[in-house]
Amino acid sequence: MYQDFFGLRELPFALTPNTDFLVNLSSHQECLNLLHVALSQGEGFVKIVGEVGTGKTLLCRQLMNDLETEGVKVAYLPSPELDGRELLLALARELAVDLVEKDNPHDIRDQIFHRLIEFARSEKRVVLLVDEAQTMSRGALESLRLITNLETEKRKLLQVVLFGQPELDEQLQGRDMRQLRQRITFSYRLQPIVSQNIGRYINHRLAVAGYNGEGLFDSAAIKRIYRASSGIPRLVNVLCNKAMMAAYGKGDRVICSRHVQRAVADTDEALCQRSYTSWLLGGVALMVAVAGGVLYRVML
């Protein structure tokens, strides 16, 4: 690939959620701060929602690293497309509970309770991180709620952080979900990268990957990446990677607008984002024009 050509140790825009590349952006830092505050207060449920590609899994991994450093027992469910019993089994395995395969949900829940009490007696906090939580069935959500019923006089024995796409909010709107909904004491919605931070995001990832030269992406390239990605981190990564491949193929040492344009043309989602942005801006311009025409007639 192009690592040697640009003087890199590794690929700077890989899609793997590597916490070494986490950029201290305002939305992500606010989210991490809220998570640490909520969990330190012993609250039961915390919900983090964000569109596809906004960095939920990366934040989940960073939180996991932070908690393990603090001595917290972390259970992790990366893709909980499970029914109620399967979720209990997965959680039991994460907590190293000895199970018999034929155990019914009630027995599994009891054994999880006993294990949580053991952790509490040793003054060890237990946090469950659920990624892609929008895929959970209602039965799995209800099983999760029942597990969190166990608590001491001072705190919950199991804290849960749900990371999910906006569909998670829709999943929780049903009347049968109101008990769980009331237990979500903190929530946060991740935002895309704002335009003024796109350059910082790109340059940080390049620096972590080993680049130590002058600005590799010129200002026009950065602006075009923002317009085509709408600030979605995953899409920024895809476009930057492809633009660097285009520059490498031409032997160019600086990524400019034409390299990004080739990347955009090769990325369906970027074309969709750009079309949506153009439609939105066109709608705003039309409203301004209409408002201006009305005002002109009023003045006459």
Image (tube, grey):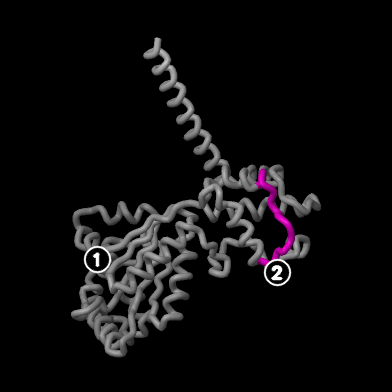
Q: In this view, does 190 lie to the left or right of 121?
A: right
Note whether residue 294 is visible: yes
Residue at (63, 48) in percent of width and height: 222
Q: Which amino acid does label 2 sit on?
A: Arg
Our reading of the magenta stretch's main secondary structure is loop
Residue 176 position, x and y percent, is 20, 57
Quadrant placement of the N terminus? bottom right
The residue to which callout 2 is attached is 9
Q: Does the magenta stretch include residue 176?
A: no
Tell me the SS state at disc 2.
loop
Q: Pointer 1: residues within 10 angstroms few (<14), some, or many (20+)?
A: some
The residues tagged by marks 1 and 2 sit, at their Cα atoms, a distance apart of: 46 Å
Picture disc at residue 18: none
Residue at x 25%, y 82% (from the top left corner): 113
Task: Please name which of the two marks, 1 or 2, marks the residue nearer to the observer.
Answer: 2
Residues in magenta, as a range: 209-221
Disc with the residue nearer the chain's start (1 vs 2): 2
In the image, residue 34 above or below residue 93: above
The residue tagged 1 is 142
User: In this view of the protein, which residue sits in the foreground, 190 or 158?
Assistant: 190
Give the image location of residue 86, x and y in percent: 32, 72
| Residue 187 pos. (x, y %) | 33, 60
Residue type at tag 1: Glu
